[in-house]
Amino acid sequence: MVTGSVASVIYGEPRLTHDVDLVLELRAEEVSVFVELFPIEEFYCPSKETINAQIAREKEGHFNIIHHATGFKADVYPMGQEELHKWAMANRHQIKIEGSDIWIAPPEYVIIKKLQYYKEGQSDKHLRDIEKMLEFSADVIDKTIISQRVAEYDLLDQWCKVSDKS
């Protein structure tokens, strides 16, 4: 499922990004096939052991895949037991982009994750992304869900910075 900046661009306003964030449900028996999709001549891809260690984590698993020629990076977040990831997977949307079907995270999930990233790193790009999502996709964003998650994840201060503007 696509999330992060790429998802915020779809729900909001275009901007440049050098990576794609993905939440992935990957089982241990699928890791070998997954690694084969990224030949070492073209991509940096972690070892099977590293990926297995990350997918075994209940929370906060993470690994990268990097295309050598372009430097384009995928930040991959294994679903694990994270309730927010599970909710997003169950509520994702399938969209068509340039003839291909992709799964995209629900906008409420994207907003909550961007609020978390802002809380951690204070990068204003996350707030701008949220503001544009609220501006361009207000009709598909459920603020009740956001309010519940904001309380659950202690993000009220961050949410107030953007919700007062919408």
Image (spheres, rainbow, N blue to C red):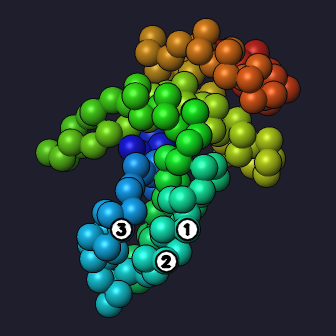
Identify the mark nearer the N-term, 2 or 3.
3
Q: Residue furthest bottom?
A: 41
Residue 39 point in image, percent of width and height: 29, 83
The answer to whether residue 117 shows anywhere in this view is yes
- In percent of width and height, residue 9 lies at 46, 40
Mark 1 crowdedness (10 Å alpha carbons): few <14, some 14-19, many ≥20:
few
Q: Residue furthest right?
A: 157
**Residue at image coords 38%, 56%:** 27
Q: In whole angstroms, how far apart are the C-alphas of marks 2 and 3?
A: 9 Å
Q: Is residue 34 left or right of residue 54?
A: left
Tell me what residue is drawn at x 59 percent, y 40 percent: 82
Q: Amino acid at mark 1?
A: Ala
Tell which of 71 and 81 is nearer to you. 81
Task: Say which label, 1 or 3, has the lower sequence index.
Answer: 3
- The answer to whether the residues at label 2 and label 1 have Cβ atoms under 8 Å apart is yes
Mark 2, secondary structure of its residue: helix
User: Where is mark 1, residue-wise?
Assistant: 53
Say which element carries label 3: helix
Q: Out of 19 and 52, give the one closest to the viewer.
A: 52
Residue holding disc 3: 31
Where is residue 162 shown, x and y percent of the image? 72, 25
